[in-house]
Image (spheres, grey):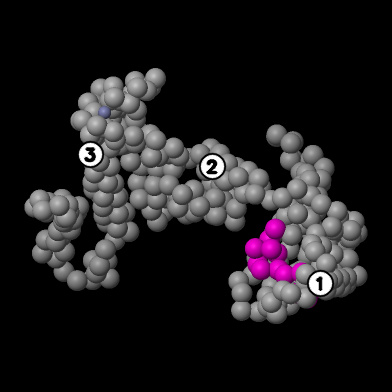
Amino acid sequence: MKMFIQIIIDPENGRPATTKNVAEFKRESLSTDTLGLTLLESKVILKNIQSVVTQQQVDHYIHEYQPCPRCHQHQTIKGHHTIVYRTLFGKLSLKSPGLTICSCQNSDQKSISPLSKALPERMSPEFQFLQSKWASLVSYGMALNIIEDVLPVKSNIATVFNNTQKVAKRLDAEIGDEKTSYIDGCQAQWDTLPYPDSPLSVGIDGGYIHSRDGDNRKAGWFEAIVGKSLQDEKPSKRFGFVCQYDDKPKSRLNTMLQRQGLQMNQDITFLSDGGETRYEIFKNGLVLNQNTCWIGFM
Ligand SMILES: [Zn+2]
């Protein structure tokens, strides 16, 4: 038995629908090996669907962009170049036209590339997210293997590293400057706040890790601090940093707690093993509100 997967594209403008072939596969006898789709088939199908869908979107976008926005004259295509755009469902090579800007616009610019303008980044946000997420949990090589095992993508460790660093720097830039105290407002303002959610509990711990400097695997030690914030009926959040390098550890923790919905009238309890460095870093700044409680276990 032969099976075909097709996409029907309805332009919804009175013109007839068109059909594009995505994949075809054969099945003979039924067994555990032949029932349903194989991983390889699923990758091919996903890749082909992505290719057809994106080509339709690009064609439609260029078609819409071609008339001059002022006089509606057709702007001519002066040439093409290729844009490589990476998605979770395959690397796309998109043909990007350069349009001659209509003379009625009196623009100093002679031409425009609408597709380059629409896609300033060359990697889909979901791909960046998944790659960075896995690379933050396991080694860059393992992250690459996991993604390549299940999705129709090919990459290399250097790319995973560079993209993860890029995302990490962007996230770091969202964290506010380090402050002495994070107590915001006064009692009168706190009294007007809505009744807070259940108390927050934050566990903090740390450990010493061997440093590496190039090929030297004995470049001393560094201390990493990790923590987890728990609250009833809300997902937990985690944080981590290296004491010697992080110049805004308190702000990092505060940002995480704010994202978890911390209010100034909310109870918050810190649990620690009482490690000296941990206290040293936080003792002045971790009093986040008047309901902060510190419990150190020696
Ligand atoms: Zn014009």
Tell me where the magenta segment starts and ends, as one range: 255-270
Q: Residue 150: percent from the left, percent from the top?
A: 40, 56
Label 2: few (<14), some or many (≥20) within 10 Å? some
For this rendering, which residue is in front, 29 or 272? Answer: 272
Q: Is residue 291 left or right of residue 239?
A: right
Q: Secondary structure at mark 3?
A: helix
The secondary element bearing badge 1 is classed as helix
| Circles 3 and 1 in contact, beta carbons < 8 Å | no
Give above or below for 191 relative to 155.
below
Q: Quadrant of the C terminus?
A: bottom right
- Residue 188's disc is 1
Rendered view: 79 above or below 45:
above
Give me the C-alpha separation between circle 3 and circle 1.
Answer: 59 Å
The residue that label 3 is drawn on is 63
Residue at the image point whose x is 75% and y is 54% from the top: 251
User: How far apart, in angstroms, are the residues tagged by discs 2 and 3?
Assistant: 32 Å
| Element at label 2 | helix
Q: Where does the N terminus fall, quadrant-wise?
A: bottom left
Amino acid under disc 3: His
Q: Quadrant of residue 4?
A: bottom left
260 inside magenta stretch: yes
Indicate the position of residue 191 as horizontal and vertical percent values.
Answer: 78, 76
**Residue 125 placed where, x, y %?**
46, 49
Q: Which mark is residue 163?
A: 2
Which amino acid type corresponds to the residue marked 1 in the rendered image?
Ala
Whichever of callouts 2 and 1 sits on the residue coming sooner in the sequence is 2
Q: Is residue 92 left or right of residue 72?
A: right
